[in-house]
Amino acid sequence: MRRRRPLILFFLPGLVLYLAVFVYPTLSGLYYSFTDWDGLSPSHRFVGLDNYLRLAEHIVFQKALVNNLKFMAAVVFCQTILSLVLALYLQRSTHVNAALRSLYFIPAILSSVSVGFIWTFIYDPSFGMLNNLLESAGLSSWSRNWLGDAGIAIYAVAGVQAWAHIGQMVILFVAGLQAIPADLLESAKLDGGTRWQVFRHVTWPLLAPAAALVVSYTTIQSFKAFDLVFTMTGGGPNYSTEILSTFIYGTAFSSFKFGFAAAASCVFLLLIAVITFLQFKALRTERVTY
Amino acid sequence: MKSSIRYIFLTIVMVVTVMLTSACSSGNGSTTGTGEQPTTPASGNGGAVKKVTVNFLHWRGEDQEVFGRLISQFEEANPGIQIETQVFPSDQYQASAQAKLLDGSSGDVFAAFPGAQFEALVRAGLYTDLSGEAFLSAYNPSLIEAGQKDGRQLAVPYQLVYNMPIYNVKLFEEQDIEVPKDWDGFLAAAEKLKQAGIIPIAFPGADIGPGQFMNVMVMNNAPDPDIFVKLEAGETKLTDAWWVKTLAQFKELNDKGYFQPDALGTKDQGAGALFVQDKAAMLATGSYQLAQHKKNNPELEQKLLAPITVPANEMIYEGIHTTTFLLGVNSQSKHPEEAKKWLAFLSSPEAAGAYANATGQNVTVNGVEYETEELKAVAEWSTRKTRFQPRFTMKNAEVQKAVTGSIQAVLAGQTPEQAAADAQAIVNQEIGK
């Protein structure tokens, strides 16, 4: 025991920090979700489950939830498929592939706020590069009011989210692909398997753990995409891009309803946990052995 | 013995780690100046005295230069006081400032937005009552009402802004258009501009446009200055004629092509660019942008106008004003008297004039000499019949958002009635009806 004491001291600072900056605020948030605290007043009332009951029928919260699910679905679908396709093309370790992987990774190191500003200009209906490019290519009928059309704005933002993080996911997939023994793929080809069959029956089962990681990470990222949405649309027009994180921010810091915002945060946390758990269950594969 | 030394060493490492971490985590705004520190007086009779540091918390990063000059003047006149400024960008100010204010360690003097933020800070008891302070006489009494609550002057709004469309004087003259005096006149002017290939109104519908332009559009449709107070009290509804008519007029402007195409996707910068490049004749924002436009296009001649949405003989208000940048003294401050001295200094016509001329913002202080054409043009409005910005009379930010959202909804194609009903449903939830 005496010999272990110094070791305990090594992880104590980390533990103290974890308790102070994660556990304590989380438990405080849970506590405040049962109060009517406005974030400023020294006192507050205990309101029981009122905040949660209000959330159940709150129009804007429901819109934010639906938008968030649309956003998540679009991001997870685009980001996973595109990063997998790119990873399949870039898996071989050549100089060109290494350079391309770095290139695709660059957006991930930019701040979301910068990405948001850049894409706001690209999407601008009057001066934006995207509509200008489409018009130059004779595709003016494809031009859209990308962030101003309530029907497509959430998908336009989702596209940016996917663009910004595809590079990261490519790295995860490439790591998964490179871990697959080459002799397995070779023997599958020698057995006469087509490219699709080799992918479907050999590559994909062995890549499933990486795919599960990519999907769950992307899901969590898409729920936490506050800064991108805030910078690009602020939740508008008319709540069409309001997502849970912007709803919580507005409720806490513009409406000064911290208790209500804390309740929304708890639901938010629970939702991410449930969706991530379900995804892991759906993508869980038996250990593949050959 | 060896083991004890190791323990002592590890404990020191741990303490240093924690101290470093806490040092890293404190403060994320930009701060100038230093904390309370000993200094030797210039005349020096030997001992070091402590300077009192007054922390000034605000969001106007663009005003740092002029504030720096004013602080130097103030510190020269008050050698025992040092002003330290802490600036958060306006979009982070709501979230960051209030946490700083609560413990009294920051923001001895602090700025606030009128409306929801001011109300929340009042509820939290963060204001020192300034009623009866001598420096209040420097202000135009009608322009500091936004800083009053229950008969007490809790803050002084420093900036005076007119939230009305800016128009390009030369383009109006070229098209032989006079400032319209009623709704029909406004529509006729817009049509004339459109026929000449000029965008009548650049409208930043994606961000600030609805919240700015709604004020002039509603001011005569609902002349009651408490109309939105009544909305929040459940005594009137957005589905009533005054708001449905306002939405219908927004729709009319949009449907007739008097806003630029895809106005809902245009942000402030985009709309501003259309105006500065002479592509649009009006810009639906406010006087706070005049100086920036002039910087971007020195040839631009700008004035303010408001669409009068009723027949000329029914007009009550000519425009909209907002008094903002509400300066208050923190009730948690350890140096309230020194904080008030700084506020009193800013209230002098000389300091306020220096601030106004450097920033291009009009101020609420009397007797200020404005130097630029833009500031002078705006100052003319102080004698006109203007109304305090109706949007800021809404104390609930969610109600504000529902109201501006209904404008976006009609521009997106909804009927005014439906947009008003949807917004009212949100309002009902917010006010518990």
Image (tube, coloured by chain):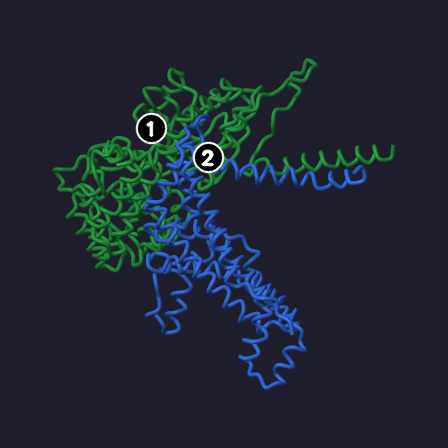
Q: Is residue B400 left or right of residue B105?
A: left
Chain A: drawing colour: blue
**Quadrant in the picture for residue B136:** top left
Using the rendered image of the protein, determine whether residue B102 is visible from the camera's viewpoint.
Answer: yes
Looking at the image, how many numbered discs can be counted on the residues? 2
Extreme top residue here? B45
**Quadrant in the picture for residue A197:** bottom right
**Callout 1, which amino acid?**
Ala
Dot 2: element: helix
Chain B: drawing colour: green
Asked if A170 appears above or below B424 in the picture, the reply is below
**Quadrant in the picture for residue A263:** top left
Q: Which residue is mark 1?
A: B146
Closest to the observer: B169 or A67?
Answer: A67
Q: Which residue does the image show at 37% across and 36% down from the upper left?
A: A50
- Residue B313: where, in percent of width, then height? 12, 38
- Provide the chain ID for the residue under circle 2: A
Using the rendered image of the protein, determine whether residue B377 is visible from the camera's viewpoint.
Answer: no
Closest to the observer: A176 or B159?
Answer: A176
Q: Which mark is residue A32?
A: 2
Asked if A174 appears above or below B12 in the picture, the reply is below
Extreme right residue here? B1
